[in-house]
Amino acid sequence: MPNAYYRTKDEQQVNEKSESSESASHKNFIEVEIEKDMATKTELIGKQVATRFPPEPNGYLHIGHAKSICLNFGLAKTYGGTCNLRFDDTNPTKESEEYVNSIKTDVQWLGFQWDKLLYASDYFGQLYDWSVQLIREGHAFVCDLNAEQMREYRGTLTEPGKNSPYRDRSVEENLDLFTRMKQGEFPDGARTLRAKIDMSSPNLNLRDPVMVRIMHAHHHRTGDQWCIYPMYDWAHGQSDSIEGITHSICTLEFENHRPLYDWFCKTLKIHHPRQMEFARMNLSYTVMSKRKLLQLVTEKHVSGWDDPRMPTISGLRRRGYTPESLRLFCEKIGVARFSSLIDVIVLENSIREHLNPIAPRYMAVLDPIKIVLTNYPQGKEELLEAVNNPEDPNGGSRQIPFSRELFIERDDFMETPPSKFFRLKPGGEVRLRYGYIIKCNEVVKDSDGNITHLNCTYDEQTKSGSPTAIDRKVKGTIHWVNARQASHVEVRLYDRLFLSETPEDAPEGKTFLDNINPDSVRTVTAMVEHELAKQEPGARVQFERNGYFCVDVKDSHPGAPIFNRIVTLKDTWAKIANKA
């Protein structure tokens, strides 16, 4: 059933007007509506905009949550208001302090600070009192139907539901049963507290929804104080009301829950925030379901929640993404009303855009093959001037050693190359970055036919940057490292975790796990400039012609950094798709 089914004509007209205003002012539709509310609603005039970010602590945050964080905290900043971090901790069997702490870390790392740190569990007492109020006023009842029976009574999208046989219990009996539920007299699932609304409503969420269920479980904050816990729909809106939230910004799947949100606030006659919905993020080549991300972790398809292939904020952070790049990404994709698939290239381009002007450049050879400059003097070594970052005028330069024996990338040489191959080949010439033009004269192989090294000559009159260098052009320039000075480092070449653009859309008989990319990480020992071996955990650099890399913060050791590839310099998947 389309979401528009639950929009009134007035709401649709407001949306149409908002779209027109948004186009004219470049504000997103939520900003347009907030400004209108704060200027015209009597109860809001003169007050601050108040938002909140309300995650459930049942897993690590992912890139989709980053969008919600940026939106809610960004709105508060834009309008000089407040934004709370509130944990909707109403399901103790799935929640933990580990998740709470990880969420707090992620929010602060992204660059935001909450005004108040709150928990839905702070309000359990008030929610209980309000439950009693609704019972007394005839708006709630204790129901003995089990979950399966409740589904049968609920009806369908085309057929109305049936009233529970317990719906007409007296107020006194309901109060007695609810008190005994709180005291722990009944087992899990034996009874629930339900709102008494309308079992024939076209919106299934209004068909006497469950408000409170029995759950004898230890809560990470309240311990064993409670054995009844509120459902999300009951806790969420009332928590917003208690905190004085003006605008409750939710993702689109909660649009159909809005009538229930409104019903609770109106029936209780309490502060009534306005709920507005925006489209959740769907990212190509990515799974966003917390349940499926947990499955990846528990079944050890990845090393943990912070595996650099995971779309979690902690995984992206460990891989080397910056908070600036994630905020830039969220700004680029904007705030939409309807869901769409965002190309992961937008995310990858955001980190490229942020790192390009600031990341220092180094040379690293990931798959080395040795070259020997047979006409370069034995024992000689010279220092060549290398620019640290050509995009940064204040980035300075460094000196790198050059000698008779060097390493180049194996892919930069082909013994029988195709046409238009402008790298090194027998009898061919290339320029060494910051150095000289060299020519390949001989391919040396072992008895098994494997290449051991290339014998080359250099043209000493072609030194880069030298005022006396002759102006001789070649079509290819390749990077290299000095064999005598190079350091060995571990490099993890991370790629997309899934092969399919929409991994959750698996064919019949398959699951999203069948779309896992078997080459999503490959570990190599690279030969790198010596200075790279001194990089601290978290340092981000560009390996020239290879990509952007970050020193792993978890597995690196002093003098032994492990480099994670954040992203290649260009989108290599587009080339694969074009070939296909």
Image (cartoon, rainbow, N blue to C red):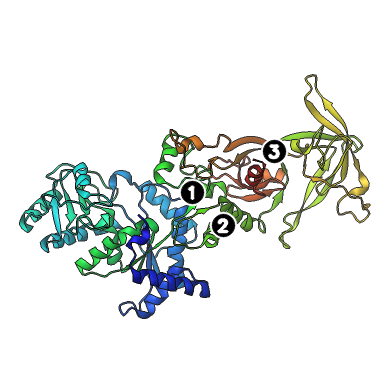
Q: Which residue is mark 1?
A: 314
Whether residue 575 sits left or right of residue 177 in the image: it is right
Q: Could you classify mark 2 by the number of other residues whose Cα lies within 10 Å: few (under 14), some (14-19), or many (20 or more)? A: many
Quadrant containing the C terminus is: top right
Where is 19 relative to 278, above or below? below
- Give me the residue at 42% from left, 64% from top: 72
Density class for disc 3 (Cα within 10 Å; few <14, some 14-19, many ≥20) is many
Disc 3 marks which amino acid?
A: Leu
SS state under label 3: loop
Q: Which residue is mark 3?
A: 366
Circle 2 residue: 325
Residue at 39% across, 72% down: 14
Are there few (<14), some (14-19), or many (20+) residues within 10 Å of tag 1?
A: many
Residue shown at 79% from the left, 27% from the top: 451
Residue 452, visible in the rendered structure: yes
Give the answer, above or below, for where 161 lies relative to 444.
below
Say above or below: 181 vs 139: above
Q: Earlier in the sequence, mark 1 or mark 2?
A: 1
Residue type at tag 1: Ser
What is the CA distance from the residue labelled 2 to the residue labelled 3? 26 Å
Q: CA distance from mark 1 to mark 3?
A: 26 Å
Percent x, y of residue 119: 31, 57
